[in-house]
């Protein structure tokens, strides 16, 4: 087994375990027949090629090291998507109160949008992983965002990959107005939140009893 596989294995384990746990939170809301602040969860271990790019960007050696662990806090990454902006705070609070993770840092790009137009709430947490040689603590980045914020970020991320951050003026302007549109979409949905949630509850109740297709 290569040094990278060995180094990344606990990160893989942390991502898998946390994905199950966060999906479990959603399932519990469903069982209690309460609208879940979590819509869906994704997770990934940073691909080695992206780790390499980041080490070049940050001017650090491309090798598993303590420095790398401290500089790249998102080797293990989870994303929690919410329907409404207010759900983000609910999820953040749920995570702050969990005993299996320790929050070490929070970055609020919702109140403080990035110049690119990026919005999301980031939490860096420490998560214990049991290995054959004992317990180790892994840093995990959890990004919490609405579906609209996620849509914008995925599109911008793909374009960023294509243009390597150097967007033509027109694309830059379009992305900025798309970010504003996503912001307005979130605002509009928040205004009819009660109506939407009532409909969703009605839909899931009837789906269980087989009254809707
Ligand atoms: P990927 O491919 O998603 O893993 P750093 O990672 O240290 O350069 P910083 O500012 O210290 O960045 O950390 P930050 O901004 O809290 O978190 C970085 C991650 O947030 C990014 O990881 C993205 O996932 C996301 N992100 C931050 N800013 C933007 C943005 O403007 N657009 C998009 N689409 N995503 C953003 P990576 O490693 O850059 O990318």
Image: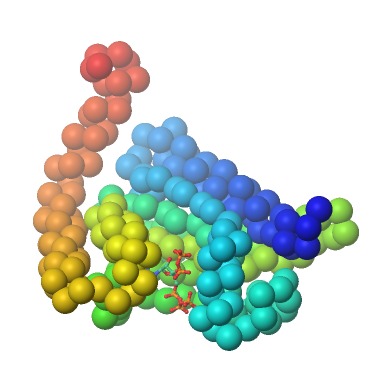
Image: 174 above or below 30: below
Q: Residue at x 30, y 63 (%)?
A: 159
Q: Residue furthest bottom?
A: 59
Give the image quarter of residue 161.
Answer: bottom left
Q: Residue furthest top?
A: 210
Q: Residue at x 18, y 68 (%)?
A: 171
Q: Residue furthest right?
A: 133
Whether residue 149 is visible, yes or no, is no
Q: Residue at x 66, y 58 (%)?
A: 11
Percent across and percent down for residue 192 are: 12, 49
Image: 38 above or below 186: above
Choose between 102 and 80: the one closer to the eye.
80
Choose between 158 and 140: the one closer to the eye.
158
Give the image quarter of residue 133.
Answer: bottom right
Percent across and percent down for residue 180 are: 15, 67
Q: Quadrant of the C terminus?
A: top left
Q: How is the image coloured?
A: rainbow
Percent across and percent down for residue 66 are: 72, 78
Give the image quarter of residue 126.
Answer: bottom right
Percent across and percent down for residue 154 are: 33, 57
Whether residue 123 is visible, yes or no, is yes
| Quadrant in which ligand 1 is drawn | bottom left
Image: 111 above or below 87: below
Q: Residue at x 35, y 40 (%)?
A: 34
Would residue 125 appear left or right of 176 to someone viewing this image?
Answer: right
């Amino acid at each position: 087994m290569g040094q990278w596989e060995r180094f990344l294995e606990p990160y893989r384990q942390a991502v898998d375990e946390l994905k199950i746990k966060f999906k479990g939170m959603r399932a519990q809301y469903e069982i209690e027949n309460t609208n879940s602040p979590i819509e869906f969860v994704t997770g990934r271990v940073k691909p080695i090629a992206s780790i390499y790019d980041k080490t070049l960007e940050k001017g650090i050696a491309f090798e598993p090291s303590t420095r790398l662990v401290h500089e790249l806090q998102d080797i293990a990454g989870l994303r929690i998507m919410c329907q409404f902006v207010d759900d983000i705070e609910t999820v953040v609070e749920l995570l702050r109160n969990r005993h299996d993770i320790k929050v070490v840092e929070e970055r609020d790009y919702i109140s403080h949008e990035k110049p690119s137009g990026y919005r999301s709430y980031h939490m860096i947490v420490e998560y214990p992983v049991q290995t054959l040689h004992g317990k180790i603590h892994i840093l995990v980045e959890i990004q919490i965002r609405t579906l609209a914020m996620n849509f914008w970020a995925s599109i911008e991320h793909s374009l960023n990959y294509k243009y390597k951050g150097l967007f033509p003026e027109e694309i830059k302007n379009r992305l900025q107005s798309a970010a504003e549109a996503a912001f307005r979409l979130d605002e509009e949905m928040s205004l009819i939140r009660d109506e939407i949630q009532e409909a969703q509850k009605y839909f899931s109740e009837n789906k269980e009893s087989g009254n809707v297709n």
